[in-house]
Image (spheres, coloured by chain):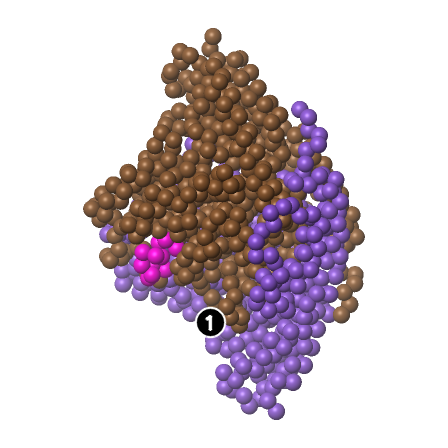
Chain colours: A brown, B purple
Amino acid sequence: MDTHHQHAGDMDPEEFRRLGKQVVDWIADYLNDASKYPVLSRVKPGDIRAQLPAVPPTQAEPMQNVLTDFERVVLPGITHWNHPGFFAYFAITGSAPGILGEMLASALNVNGMLWRTSPAVTELEEVVLDWLRQMLGLPGSFKGVITDTASVSSLVALAAARESIQRTIREEGLAGRTDLPRLRMYCSDQTHSSIEKAAIVLGIGQQGVRKIPSDHAFRMRADLLESAIREDRKNGWLPFCVTATVGTTSTTSIDPVRAIAEICRREALWLHVDGAYGGVAGIVPELRSALDGCELADSFVVNPHKWLFTPIDCSCLYTRHVDVLTQAFSLVPEYLRTAEQGVTNYMDWGVQLGRRFRSLKLWFVIRSFGVEGLAERIRNHCRLAADLAARVDREPGFERLAPVPFSVVCFRCHPAGIDDEAALETLNTRILNAVNESGDVFLSHTKLNGRYAIRIAIGNLRSRQEHIDRAWDLIRHHARALEPH
Amino acid sequence: MDTHHQHAGDMDPEEFRRLGKQVVDWIADYLNDASKYPVLSRVKPGDIRAQLPAVPPTQAEPMQNVLTDFERVVLPGITHWNHPGFFAYFAITGSAPGILGEMLASALNVNGMLWRTSPAVTELEEVVLDWLRQMLGLPGSFKGVITDTASVSSLVALAAARESIQRTIREEGLAGRTDLPRLRMYCSDQTHSSIEKAAIVLGIGQQGVRKIPSDHAFRMRADLLESAIREDRKNGWLPFCVTATVGTTSTTSIDPVRAIAEICRREALWLHVDGAYGGVAGIVPELRSALDGCELADSFVVNPHKWLFTPIDCSCLYTRHVDVLTQAFSLVPEYLRTAEQGVTNYMDWGVQLGRRFRSLKLWFVIRSFGVEGLAERIRNHCRLAADLAARVDREPGFERLAPVPFSVVCFRCHPAGIDDEAALETLNTRILNAVNESGDVFLSHTKLNGRYAIRIAIGNLRSRQEHIDRAWDLIRHHARALEPH
């Protein structure tokens, strides 16, 4: 078969070779020098749209023009998550090894829905997930699957939890049934919104989510969980699931997973653990205790695209109950039947049929850093956060608003004599906005017991002491300038 | 701020530059020459796993070793979706412009959850989706969002449909309610399994999906839909949604969308159209009629990662009811509140909070090919399929099993005198397996009215006449060798 003169897309292979190298040069410079851009985009709503043609091009355009427009039009509208001064939300990293993995995955362009549609996609996924399981010290009974996001991982886990109530829910659904009471799942008032969203999607409804109050350190109160379950049963609800979190979104607090697991065991509830951010701390020996009790979970999610330097998206869902998960999700139409026996067909494990080759980048990252190299980076982020927390504690007119178990610090400017919450929120909002306008750092906020908190989340591989110093200097500078005299 | 000496991941920027170019060289060769690999991987279950260490590496490994292992260990386990002989399922393409887009997206590594987390991600998505809408001739009232897969796009659409029944479903859920009857949605017996899976996830249940029989050309019988709705209402079901398909998975049949839309209008049901594969045919003027009636849909899904040469994953969901969609999904915790008014925050549009910069690759593809260039490729695939269908029709001992509205041909070997379905299935399975063992082409199968059908799906950009000739030669060769004499 003549295989020559095939065109790569609409592009001669030699043109791809040339442009690909040009793009690699751009990326190398970008990774080296992302801090030359303002981290938070300065465009106004509509600025980018206004520069783009309202109608699509009829004729092909030279790729060089597209790349030029990428720099000219798109780049100013980018908030640079790969900037070392990115400290908002949870900071993430598109590391160089991960980018190389994504390049190859996009070229292969396989769909790993079935074992046979690329055996290496399935088997590398199984192996790399088992590596990560070992790195976190989780039991061998935990089997994993990669999804795109924790939102989907948790949705899939909670669908399995729902199926575990009664194995006919997938057939009969939930609506209009007289044999099924209202369903209740539990989480804390600090749990990520994706859990509530999953409840919406699954037909549990927001009223089916009972949020257990947290303690002074933002950890779910296990005693209140227990009494809530008792009360709900008395009132005709059917409790079926608890979500505990290792590293909540606002403060990275760690729920008492072991105590919660004990309650779940007694009450026969599914225990889902959201370790999307904090789970990777298990790689660091001296932080391993953060995962205490997680070995008892029925499902567990951790996101390498958050704090494991893997390009977005990559979320890992583990469960001890693959049978329930696949019972909830497996649907095999004739056109997807294959003859292989005893293989994993990951399409049976979740919502999506189409599956990118996500394990490749994770494999690249784990091998390129090594387990100790990954642990050292995570340890270093925690060290930087602890140091910042100590500085906040020492600074007059500032107060820290939460413990710092991992790499996120929550605090506010609180000048002596101002105790009105609204005034403090206004002041801290103005400080935050002024700091973010610098272009050097980007911070976000949260609210803790009604108090507005500035949040510094350290998680990008390239963030170093100097970037945190810069953030802290800017905060103190604007606090002095903005606080009432 | 000193921005020098920053390391790109665990890799010196110059090392990334060097390795990135090496990877680009590999990709350029691969795109040019993918047909040198067997299209269907020849490994046995466990072969890949056996070559991978069971424990993760403690120390960092040189990236060069990882790249070597990629070629040595992973590549033999790849089924080459980018091979011009890939004719299974729906053939897809990781085109060169799309790969360049993915490279840049993975380097920027942004999360487009909010407008402010990268205004260009949101605004480019809005613009490119509007381009695609125009290319398909859909009305300006259709607003879009990019998701990963059609499974998720349809799940989101059907969640909105469910919410449209009663705007309290997101709060109250479905279980244990006396005010809500059992819910029913409709599709045909040819509809993709993702619709049934969405019903499972949403708590509608498989029994809540009524599959309307299709006609001789595998199109939903609108008359039977109407009577089914009537019957269901009489029996206490609450009908709420119909899914019609433009390009079903087995045969690419086209449901009578206009007639179905008329029924939906009369019955006040949500009309969802699954055009994941076939939708892009609207780009070709003489095929535009395939989308007749789609302008009346409440939601519409089309996947650029299927037949629009965009690397997986990229699915576009359009709806005329953004208010219902966001009513179903919006959940804004304090830590995700932003000040900008009147902007789109795409996290409110679906399940996932984390969102890759998927519009970038689609923008690269549309500009690099141009609308006419894209139309010409799709037209050409349909021409190749029509030609193959004609050859099947002329060939003694073969029969075509479905019309060919797009680029998929379903047929079987049916030697004179054999009328036992089991015998025909055995014969055609053996032909299919023998053809796939060639390494030159990869075909899959389906069943149509109980008849086993070989399926040739033309969709890869690099598939040309010679590759189809090779498939057809192999089929006839093995048919002659295998059929009973």
Residue A179 falls left or right of residue A395: left
> Up-down: is B336 above or below A202?
above
* Nearer to the camera, A421 or B357: A421
User: What residue is shown at x 27% (from left), y 42% (from top)?
Assistant: A226
Q: Position of residue A308 (x, y in %)?
A: 56, 42
Q: Residue B176: horizontal and vertical position, in percent?
A: 26, 52
Quadrant where the image shows the N terminus of chain A: bottom right
Residue plotted at (51% across, 70% down): A341
Q: Which residue occupies the foreground of this view, B81 or A73?
A: B81
In this rendering, the answer to whether B342 lies above or below A481 is below
A258 relative to B39 in the view: left or right: left
Residue extent of the magenta highlight: A160-170
| Element under disc 1 | loop
Dot 1: chain letter: B
Residue picked out by circle 1? B215
Q: Measured from the top left, where is residue A200 in percent x and y?
A: 37, 46
Q: Is residue B470 magenta?
A: no
Residue occupying the point 57% across, 67% down: B45
Residue B157 lies, in percent from the top left, at 45, 51
- Nearer to me, A52 or A314: A314
